[in-house]
Image: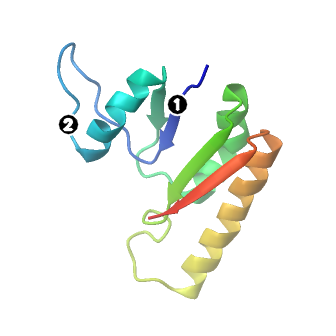
Amino acid sequence: MSRLIVVSNRVRAPEKKGEAPAGGLAVALSAALREYSGFWFGWSGETASGFANRAINDLAPFKPTVATTCYGMNDGQYHPFTDTIGNNYENNMRKVTAAAAVAKSPTLRFSLA
């Protein structure tokens, strides 16, 4: 059985019974989450370094066959790009990749923010 697990740096507001989710990402994921018995969790303001520190614990219990990440804006703290920001982001994404391998997630896909 396939299952969709979404981990993001944005989470939808809790739904009231019978109320449709608001917002683009929530609307886009709603049908897929229902179809694949999925769930969505995350932390508002998440960064690549934050997920790198938790990735093994967050991924391993679910044994995902594919994990997709999308980090970037929060990592730059909404400042113009600098080499320091770029180097920190690259180093943290390498840690995420290593953690996914330890968690035995065979495919990790990156999406640029």
Residue farthest to the bottom, as pictured: 83
Residue farthest to the right, as pictured: 102
- Give the residue type at disc 2: Ala
Q: Quadrant of the C terminus?
A: bottom left
Judge left or right: residue 85 versus residue 59: left
**Colour scheme of this structure image?**
rainbow
Q: Earlier in the sequence, mark 1 or mark 2?
A: 1
Q: Is residue 24 above or below residue 65?
A: below
- In terms of depth relative to the viewer, which is nearer, 112 or 51? 112
| Residue 29 at x, y percent in the picture | 36, 36
Quadrant position of residue 103? top right
Task: Characterize the local packing of mark 2: few (<14), some (14-19) or many (20 or more) Cα atoms within 10 angstroms.
Answer: few
Quadrant position of residue 61? top right
Residue at screen point 76% across, 48% down: 99
Tag 2, which secondary structure? loop
Residue at screen point 82% across, 43% down: 102
Q: Is residue 70 above or below residue 83?
A: above
| Residue 11 at x, y percent in the picture | 37, 39
Judge left or right: residue 97 versus residue 12: right
Q: Nearer the viewer, mark 1 or mark 2?
A: 1
Q: Is residue 99 above or below residue 80?
A: above
- Give the residue type at disc 1: Leu
| Residue 82 at x, y percent in the picture | 51, 86
Tag 1, which secondary structure? loop
Q: What residue is pinned by disc 1?
A: 4
Residue at screen point 38% across, 71% down: 78
- In terms of depth relative to the viewer, which is nearer, 42 or 37? 37
Residue at screen point 32% across, 35% down: 12
| Residue 73 at x, y percent in the picture | 42, 66
Q: CA distance from mark 1 to mark 2?
A: 20 Å
Q: Which label was assigned to residue 22?
A: 2
Task: Characterize the local packing of mark 1: few (<14), some (14-19) or many (20 or more) Cα atoms within 10 angstroms.
Answer: some
